[in-house]
Image (tube, rainbow, N blue to C red):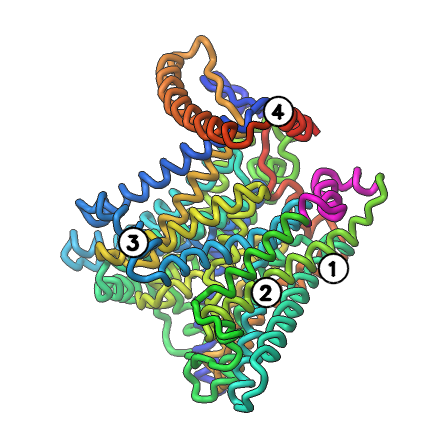
Amino acid sequence: MTWTLFVAFLAKTIKAASIYIFGSTGEIVTEKSGHLNMGIPGIMFMGALGGILGENIWLTASGNNLNPFMILFMPIIFAMLFAALGGLLFSFFTVTLRCNHNVTGLTLTTFGVGLSSYFIGLIKNDSISKAGLAMQSMVKFDWGDNWFGSIFLSQSFLTYFAIVVAIAASLIISRTKLGLNLRACGENPAAADAAGINVDRYRYLATIIGAAIAGLGGMALELDLLKGFYNAKDAVDSFGWLCLSLVIFSMWKPSICIGASFIFGAAQQLKYYLELSSAQQQIFSLLPYVLTILVLIITSVFNHKNTQAPAGLGVTYFREDR
Amino acid sequence: MTRTETRKHFKMPIHVVKKLDLSKKSYWTIKVVGILIAFLLSGLLCTIFAPGTFVTYYEKMAYGIINPKNYETFMLFLETAGLLLLIAFALAPAFKMKFWNIGAEGQISIGCLVTAGIMFHMTKTGDNSNQLLVVSLCLLFSVLAGIIWALIPALFKAFFNTNETLFTLMMNYVAITLISIFISIWIKSGSQAFPSIHEGQLEDLFGMKIKYLWNLIFVVVIVALMIVYLKKTKHGYELSVVGASLNTARYVGINTKKVIIRTMILSGAICGLVGFLLVSGHEHSLNPGIANGRGFTGVLVAWLGQFEPASMVLYAVLVAMFQCGSGKAASYVGISRAEFSAIVTGMFFLIIIATEFFINYKVLVKEDSKLKPVVDKINNFFSKVGGAISRFFDKINFFKKLKKKKPKDVQQTSKESEEDK
């Protein structure tokens, strides 16, 4: 690998990592409240649909006006809105109707992926790629030709935004009273309820906000990394499940998840930059799953409180239960 | 804390309590109402996507299930339902002891990989050996592979209490990626397309040329065995004890580690077998998405059926109806097929999940609330619908009584006492 190729690889790694950061930060926020949302691939897909729709609405309404603010603002708002709807659906079923998390999540994945790929299929391919190109043209901070600039300073706005969101989530979860209450809901909802915390409201909000953040990941994948090139549902699907595994890998901490996302991003991108046979390429895509399994095993063998999932994860809370 | 307290002036007008006394009849009434709503909504969805196709949708849906001109349509429908049922039965024992095995997809995929590998190499070497031998080799090794895939998370769960939901989920993707790795190793040309394999096809066995018949035979036999295993054996009983309370199980002297490992071996074996049936009896080929979400759908069928054989059969058939029927209807009215059937299946499951709420809980409206008359009206409407359906059930019971002329009271009391436990 030559130096220029290596620089390009690192830049692409950071871009890919931003998707993982969005997805897994959203899922961590959700899981901290005790909700195991396995519908994250479906929700990311809904975010991707929202992003494409938002960009298209703006471009058609304004006649291809590439106003940098609006071109960012519209897809972000729409992606968050669509994904939040998915989160609302999930929390309505699990909080209000008290359904099983695993079952609801898996259904939401089927439903969300089906619905979004149906509507994305209706949108013309060239208008999707137009949206992607608009995103590409406007969001870069271009900073010269040196290696530092092209790795760290030429990323799109979404990449920096992802890191900011993850840091903010980390601070809120670990440093504020809001975060303490949120963690209480996830660890022991009955105790939290007894302490006067409205568990249902916390779980609703955490799931909806988490879904909105994860939806940005879907949009970033579709419009930023794939540049509006829509290649079936496989891409979003595998990214979605990897985000779920990244949550385990980073041991439910958004701060670790930033670093871990770079490892996953590198594993995802490295195969395009090395001269490999297609079998060897596939082995690289095996890497994130195997790493996650290893982390899962290691953390369970050294059973330490700080590295485990929230104790109430995946358990529906009903006040009148014992 | 003060902020949350000040906001508490808003009172919820409704109150949710657990239902404790639910008769079998009202249980099924709720389920049937849910299923009817799902059927109606799927037709409505079709008319929204392609206007004016409400009637056509149901007509074509029926054709997607039973086509008088082509018996294979019906066989395919039966086979879809059968394989789903088999997966659900594989998962039911694990779920019954609250081991959340989400890894059916991976266990099926690894079974597919092993079967396709053996069949592919037998075809390549070209010696026309005994077909029976090839098929039984495939069967044996796919079951073994499924067992291994289920055993890894089970061992870690038993000894280190590793989270099995996430572990089995990851194992799915390892298996799926392994398929792509082996396809690229076996197919040197670099294309990911796997050729159709002739050696070791299940249909060739004993000259039975009817498509999917072998798969159905396997399904019927194994489902029957599993029903006996779950209902009549000591193992089946131990499962429910472990699921109900781990501590109770320990106190009465059940070796919980052994139960977990044994159950997962069974679960993995059946899933591996499904993989074998899928390749040898259905696809005769291999691709990474060969399991096609069946494992996840099986999870839903098993859980929503509450591990009751009758309910699981019902849901498996209904899901197969939606998958085969609405796919066909969608492609007829010009909607993309796979997406529409995914949406409809998802919607069906969401509605069925929601019916779980009405089975387990009831909503009481507080007396002083303004919502009271509205909710009363809704309740009246649903009790009318429910009454009509339960009268229908009564009629069926009436016919049964005519046939059997057997006092039913004894059976019912024994069932009730079982439920009490």
Q: How far apart are marks 4 and 3 (CA)?
A: 48 Å
Say which quadrant the C terminus of chain B sits in.
Answer: top right
Q: Earlier in the sequence, mark 2 or mark 1?
A: 1
Residue marked by disc 2: B273
Looking at the picture, how far across and down is residue B355, in whole percent? 47, 34
Asked if badge 2 and badge 4 are on a common chain, one would say no
The residue range painted magenta reads B229-250
- Label 1 element class: helix
Image-quadrant location for residue A44: bottom left
- In the rendered image of this protein, does residue A48 appear above or below residue B351? below
Location of mark 3 (residue):
B63
Q: In this view, does A112 lie above or below B36?
A: below
Q: Which of marks 2 and 3 is in front?
A: 3
| First reached walking from the N terminus: tag 2 or tag 3 | 3
Subunit under mark 4: A
Residue drawn 31% across the image and 39% down it: B40
- Residue A78 screen position, x and y as percent: 31, 48
Toward the viewer: B43 or B216? B216
* Residue B163 counted in the magenta span: no
